[in-house]
Image (cartoon, rainbow, N blue to C red):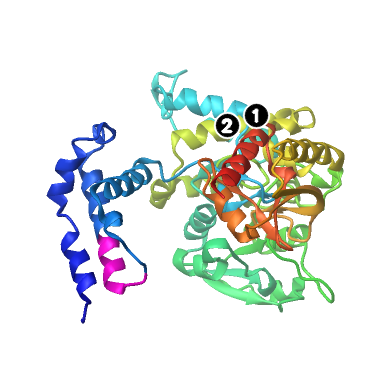
Amino acid sequence: MNLSGKQQTFLRMLPAVDYILELAKTDSLFDNVPKSVLVRSIRSVVENFRMTIIEDQQDLTEADLSDANLLNKIKNRVKIAMAPMLTRVINATGVVVHTNLGRSLLSDDAVQNLLAIASGYSNLEFDLSKGMRGSRYSIVENILCEISGAEAAMVVNNNAGAVFLSLETLAKDKKVIVSRGELVEIGGSFRIPDVMAKSGGILREVGTTNRTHLKDYENAIEHDTALLLKVHKSNYSVVGFTAEVSLEALVALGAKYKIPVMEDLGSGTFVDLSKYGLLKEPTVQESVKAGADIITFSGDKLLGGPQAGIMVGKNDLLMKIKENPINRALRIDKLTLAALESTLRHYRNIDREMDSIPTLRMLTLSLAHIESKAKTLAKMLENISDTRLSVDLIDTSSRPGGGSLPLLTLPSKGVGLNVRGISANAVEEQMRNHELPIIGRIEEDLFIMDLRTLLDDELPIIKHAVEHMLKKA
């Protein structure tokens, strides 16, 4: 490697880690910084300078390598290292159940119960009435049965786990019949065929991508068929020349041949969303009433709770699943149980408590309410009185997200920002890197914030972020 004299001089100017450690002792900001964090930050800054010098892609000066400048960069690196990696963000995308942003928000009751359980001991596996060891599954089983009408219920850490555990328990080394049109893949490369293979179940595809008939299932039944599996296509839709077998028909076929029927509802909901002007989604109660033996669904999608995989169905099958040793690897923890139980309690009187569950509240917000909030935010931003800033009230559309209701778009209102001299991409980056990150989207060279997913107390934070951005520009 041929380096210029200037490059060699700059490389010699880079101080040793020990020297900077001694230098840091003169700045009180580093007093409470763990040595491991400080050393790693020093090495990172020095190495970045070393690579910059060697690659010669930036005009450096001696001032850039001064003790003061090095310490400033190390302070910034330490600040990043000491900050939590998992942090709150503001969701201005309009995607209600945003997988990348943590999916559903918890209700106030769920948050309070979670804090209470987290800060003290609990009866997680202790039966208070009998004074002896109990089961963590009993904490939510009764309320799940009450709401759904099922005989039994249990919960694991997510729906993929629920599907896997059910298949491994009921169909290991045996055949599971599934319509080819229901072999879905959801986010994170969760594929029904892959989960089936890992569980030990043997996949038996029937029908075609767009059309499957009852006779296809019946013709595929053999002596080693363990399950008939129906998978709700919650993240896509096949339209046109289509046919699929109803759950009721599949249950009747299963009864004829004494084969259990399992349904993976995916998102899962206890509410008939069509009553609120949304598209119809099959409810858990409807699947139970139709006679499905095992039903699995998520806790953090349309249910509006924490991440969890919920199973409801017939008692004899749930007992087998509970006794599976693999269950321990997938079991739900006390914090999730606390949040889930509080969420489920809202469903006892859901007509009155829809607004208590943030996911359902956002999905059913009226356009007039969203527009009023958009006007409030637009006015707040206009009051900044910076001639470079242009604020527009725009028509936009939101989405349910989380693989739910794929054909549904929700009319919404957004606020679009344009800053003269700053590109939309730069505005997006500045907002995303604010101390409380604001995640929006870019359309037609505008940074857009959809008001459907913004909370009222987040509007002043957005104003502060825009002011901060303008001052830096």
Which label number is shown at residue 341? Answer: 2
Residue 461 position, x and y percent, is: 61, 36
Q: Is residue 131 left or right of residue 98?
A: left
Q: Is residue 68 above or below residue 54?
A: above
Q: Is residue 259 left or right of residue 129?
A: right
Amino acid type assigned to the residue bearing label 2 in the image: Glu
Q: Secondary structure at mark 2?
A: helix
Q: Is residue 124 toward the left or the right of residue 473 in the image? A: left
Considering depth in this image, is 279 or 17 the residue closer to the camera?
17
**Pointers 1 and 2 in contact (C-beta within 8 Å):** yes
Q: Residue at x 53, y 40 (%)?
A: 436
Q: Which residue is at 25% across, 51% downward?
A: 66
Tell me which corner region of the image, top left, top right, bottom left or bottom right, holds residue 463.
Answer: top right
Q: Does 469 appear above or below 181?
A: above
Q: Quadrant of residue 331?
A: top left
Please report the bounds of the magenta region as a residue range: 47-57
What's the residue type where badge 1 is placed? Answer: Arg
Residue identified by numbered label 1: 345
Quadrant into which the N terminus falls:
bottom left
Alpha carbons under labels 1 and 2: distance apart: 6 Å
Closest to the observer: 423 or 32?
A: 423
